[in-house]
Image: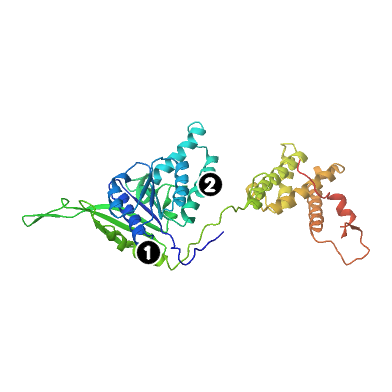
Amino acid sequence: MNATPSKNQPVPLKAGWFGPQGSGKTTSAALLALALSVEVYNRAPVFVTDTEPGWQFLRPMFALEGVELIQRTDPTFKAMTANLREAERLGACCWNVDTLTIIWNELMQSFKVKNRGFIPIDKWGDIREMWNKDYVSLFLNTTMCCQALGRLGNVQEEVQDENNAEKTKLIKTGVRFKAGGSEDFGYEPHLLLEVSTERKAKTVSGSKREGEGRMLHRVDVLKDRTWQLNGKVFRWSDKPRYEKGGYKTVWESIKPHWDALQATAHVQIATNTSSAELISVSGDSAYAERVKHVHIAIEEFWETLQTIWAGQDATSKELRRIVVETIFGTRSRTAVESKPLEELQFGVKVLQAYEQKAKTDGRLLTEKDVVVATLEELKALAAAMEAPPDEEDDFAPRRNGKPHHPQAIRELFVEGVQPR
């Protein structure tokens, strides 16, 4: 179900923060959560799933602003999803997970424990389904504001070594939020922020000492779906202590995103739906079913051909090549096996009919001209079988209300011929 909240219900913020250790992502996210509570939600509680943990050091600033901080420290995927629902029941305005990377690693480790220490390739679909259904959908659909914090991961690309044309090397081409079914949670939040640190220069006796001054927390906006902050860079100076109203520095930077967000709607992901009707009872998709039938047709054709001319003498080999060329217009095995399913099934039908005729006519096993002429005749008859019957003759034989094909064609081609 797609839902839009009432006019007095704020459209919730969905943010992702990531960066290296000590960059300030925890404090920055906490300041934004505190701002939302004070400025928008009448000091409603803030809830955190704290895996490391560290938010207890931030309790004084929440207490100073009169906002309850609810902290849970079970670092498991199961606990995190339960925490999110608990936060809703307790009336929290903002739910946070710090860090999501730990949760993702725990989920993978749980699968390893159940699968003798490794994750089989066929289990990755189960992991992603659990992650998306039990976490991502909740993260985006809840009316609470949500923030996910994660560790920094590198995006690497294999390139040719400029010093050795026969070797390649990995180079860093970017960074990512390390968590999630694609090993990058950056796609899901509406606002994605990368946090890093810089230092001001310290001035001593009129001279500047680089890298000795107060720490700056640099925030690069990598994605803002409202477009308000795309490409922006914020710098928030480190403080020796928190003072009342200290959240406003962060709030004023992020507020353009919040204001633009309120002009939109909270559209939720539809759940409990699937494309199951597209999957066969065997568990294969329509595409997979078609591929399976292609393989069956290919195998059936070559096996039938080999049955008719089983010998390895020159005559048998030449006749096999002539048959393939007459039916498919090529002698290339690769070209034949690249044909569409319908052409392959047509070829099988012609060859099976030829096999039946060859049982009573020895010339079809030895005489090239007779082989080609018979195959051309059978191709024409098979094409007639696939064409709509002539319905102009009201006196044509009928079965189940539909006209029959001519008797000669039906005798050669039995409807519903099954593979061997």
Mark 2: few, some, or many residues within 10 Å (few <14, many ≥20)?
some
Q: Amino acid at mark 2?
A: Glu
Q: Which residue is mark 1?
A: 257
Residue 371 vs residue 251: left or right? right
- Secondary structure under the numbered disc 1 in the rendered image: helix
Between disc 1 and disc 2, the foreground one is: 1
Look at 74% across and 36% down and name the residue there: 311
Separation (CA) of disc 1 from disc 2: 30 Å
Residue depicted at x 37% and y 60%: 42
Point out residue 67 in the picture as x, y percentages from the top left corner.
Answer: 34, 53
Q: Nearer the viewer, residue 249 or 378?
A: 249
Q: Quadrant of residue 401?
A: bottom right
Residue at (77%, 49%) from the top-left corner? Answer: 349
Query: In this image, 312 relative to 184: left or right?
Result: right
Towards the viewer: 317 or 388: 388
The answer to whether mark 1 and mark 2 are in CB contact below 8 A is: no
Is residue 157 visible from the viewing direction of this image?
A: no
Q: Earlier in the sequence, mark 1 or mark 2?
A: 2
Quarter of the figure that contains the N terminus: bottom right
The residue lying furthest to the left in this view is 205
Identify the disc placed on residue 129.
2
Q: Amino acid at mark 1?
A: His
